[in-house]
Amino acid sequence: MVGIVIVSHSKKLALGVRELAAQMVQGQVSIAVAAGIEDPENPLGTDPIQVYEAIASVFSDDGVLVLMDLGSALLSAEMAIEFLPEAQQQKVHLCEAPLVEGAIAAVVAAAAGRDIHQVMAEARGALLAKATQLGVVSRALSIVTPTTHVESPTREIRLIVSNRLGLHARPAAQFVATAARFKSQIRVQNLTRNTELVRGDSINQVTTLGVRQGHELVITATGSDADEALASLQVLFATNFGEDNAALNYRPAFHHAVTPATHGELLGIAASGGIAIAPIVHYQPAHIPITQYHVDDVEGEWQRVQAAIHIARQEIQAVFSQASLQIGDAEAAIFDAQLLFLEDPVLLEAAKERILEHHLNAEAAWQAVVDEVVTSYHTLEDSYLQERVDDVVDVGQRVLRLLAGNAPTNLHLQEAVILVATDLIPSDTAGLDPTKVLGICTTSGTATSHSAIIARTLGIPAVLGVDAQVLHLANGTLMALDGESGKAWVEPESHILDLLEAKQKAWQTAQQEAQATAHQPAITRDGRQVSVFANIGSISDVQVAVASGAEGVGLLRTEFLYFDRTSAPTEEEQLEVYQAIAQVLDNRPLIIRTLDVGGDKPLPYLRVGLREANPFLGWRGIRFCLDHPELFKTQLRAILRASVRHKIKIMLPMITTVSEVRAAKVILGEVQAELNQAGIAFDAAMEVGIMVEVPSAVAIADQLAAEVDFFSIGTNDLSQYIMASDRTNLRVANLVDALHPAVLRMVQQTVQAAHAARISVGLCGELAADILATPILLGLGLDELSVNPQNIPAIKQAIARFSIVESEAIVASALQQDSAVHVRELISTSVNNM
């Protein structure tokens, strides 16, 4: 632990400071005083020998921090260091921090186990709280560390976090990756928890802010591209980091809390549903022993760390690629956070310092900084964020294994088994083969850990947190587990096996029926067929969509091609993606929405110019594309070229006027003429549609219908525009409910205008995936619903439960209600009475 020395001209002052500081940490930190001189008549002064003795009395290999007042105190401290052995001199740091406040801040940091540089930083910032409280400095700017951008202004935004789970690993990874793209220095502070401003390019510092839903953050940027940086970060929050905010992925039922264990029964946490019956195999990752020793070639040792990190990055990228195919991009994004851990400048600087300044070997230095990060996660109050420590351990062990030259631990299973372990880290779980690993049983872990999430995605039943006695079972012991109830049985009796096998068979039958239904048309009880399409945002999404029974893609969000890069995608890059998606669809319809950015979703590499006070009412969607014709033309060329032998349609976003549609069609015609002139084939009959997502489009829907081939209603935006409420603002977000009668009347008006013009109309907002809303949407007469791939089976089953006549009756009553709450109550009552 870091030692503290207080140097002052006044012994009484120094002793008082020491007493105050010691009380703060219950005597946990060694604090020495060197103050005053032995002269009763003139006691004020400092003595270098006294300072030397004080330093020696609290010396630690972790370092000594010396705080002093003015004048000769500094000279005495500098002279005292010269008396120390050379090896010790490097570990003693003089700090200019204020004596009283600095000492208190320093001992608290030292007691928390922080290193010497962190302790110094805490001491130097000790006056901040007082200055802020007195209004001497502004809260947002005062904590920012001086940077090379001092000549640049500091910009600031404040926002409320709406993600269900706050800045957990994946959104934190996106935040850091975005912040790191800019030259400006990004800082972020959790105002709700009154944290310090931390570096926005540090995955660990951002994660350990403990940001949860509803917390208020302040984000500052200092540098030449500050506005662009903040705009890009604001997009992440406005779009909920691409996460579905409708519901948590999993809410386990903890049946074990009320059901006593019977003989041979183990109680645990229900983490992944399903039944597994198989012999067990113990899984134990290879232990990597660490020996700390002194190195002379510090540069060579640091190069070893860099080489191991480079290989680890390649390994994690391979895991990410495989996981994307196996569990999808959303869950595979867990490993994005691991990649950022390897690039965390705070962590890398700490490891480098241990090697270069303390001459530690690479293994010991790396393990020390990983342990510090793990400790910082464990001290968080938020249990969900504490669980993210698994990812830190995962990537830390990977680098350590490479440094030690150990081969990775691989499972070579000859038969199907239940895996028994103390715990599984995410990369272990992602590498499991569901045909060989039928179940997972561990003595630790939680239902919200990343390993549990991956197990659920893979469809592997899992019971976690069982008694440690399971670790003493012999390999090959028969086990049965129920991932829904959180129970496991060792050598289960015949009646238990019969019950579980019956439950397993019923579950498999239900799954098979759901899957079979998913690949059949969605037809109401009175024979009306409704198309069920998928909303997608990547190539892997379309694979999941087809497997889930999608009859086509109702919305391909092309923005994923434009973000996370420094320039717009080329025509060839876009063509390759569009063709790949169309190929997977195998002649099913593919509706490609043209670029929907600008306003609240800016592209950093395109200068917006003026900052927009109301970005949702600003330069976005089709407005942006019409003002960037070359960018627009490039995308249109790629879409047209991909349309050959595929059922591709173009959809224009954020249409508010007829003139916008006509202007877009003129540009489309120019592109078609250019392709014709170049002899490049395309589908000349390709349909063009629009998104209906603003009230003006509804008001002139009859005029717009005469210009296009189809409508698609985007209820997410339409709801917020109708209700004049920002759906990303928690203070008013409750008003943005697509089941409000005002919104439903707009949907009805749009459908009527479309059908009068003999064009089709679909709905691709979140409302389409709400099973409660299914009878409303059927009754309104929608021809197509487009939902996220995982919702397709449930929506198809819901459609089959209703008739159009019943649904129209529900709609007639719903349109007369005065609130979304009453609409929901009406639907529930009507469905229950059917």
Image (spheres, rainbow, N blue to C red):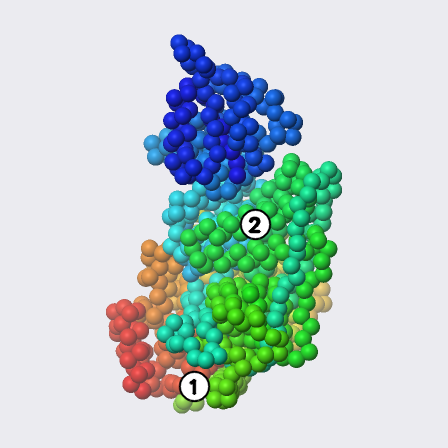
- The answer to whether residue 88 of the structure is visible from this angle is yes
Of marks 1 and 2, which one's residue comes earlier in the chain?
A: 2
x then y, percent, for residue 623: 49, 56
- Decide which of 575, 230 is in the foreground and name it: 230
Q: Residues within 10 Å of mark 2 (few under 14, many from 20)?
A: some
Q: Residue at x 53, y 51 (%)?
A: 374
x then y, percent, for residue 459: 55, 75
x then y, percent, for residue 748: 36, 74
- Decide which of 171, 296 is in the foreground and name it: 296
Which quadrant is the C terminus positioned in?
bottom left
Given the image, on which type of amino acid does mark 1 rest? Answer: Ala
Residue identifier under label 1: 800
Q: Residue at x 53, y 56 (%)?
A: 389
Given the image, on which type of amino acid does mark 2 rest? Answer: Asp
Give above or below for 480 relative to 164: below
Q: Total label count? A: 2
x then y, percent, for residue 504: 51, 85
Q: Residue at x 37, y 61 (%)?
A: 720
Give above or below for 297 relative to 434: above
Of tags 1 and 2, which is closer to the observer? 2
Which of the numbered marks, if any, corresponds to residue 470?
none
Which of the numbered marks, if any, corresponds to residue 371?
2
Q: Is residue 80 left or right of residue 68?
A: right
* SS at circle 1: helix
- The answer to whether residue 754 of the structure is visible from this angle is no
Q: Quadrant of residue 285?
A: bottom right
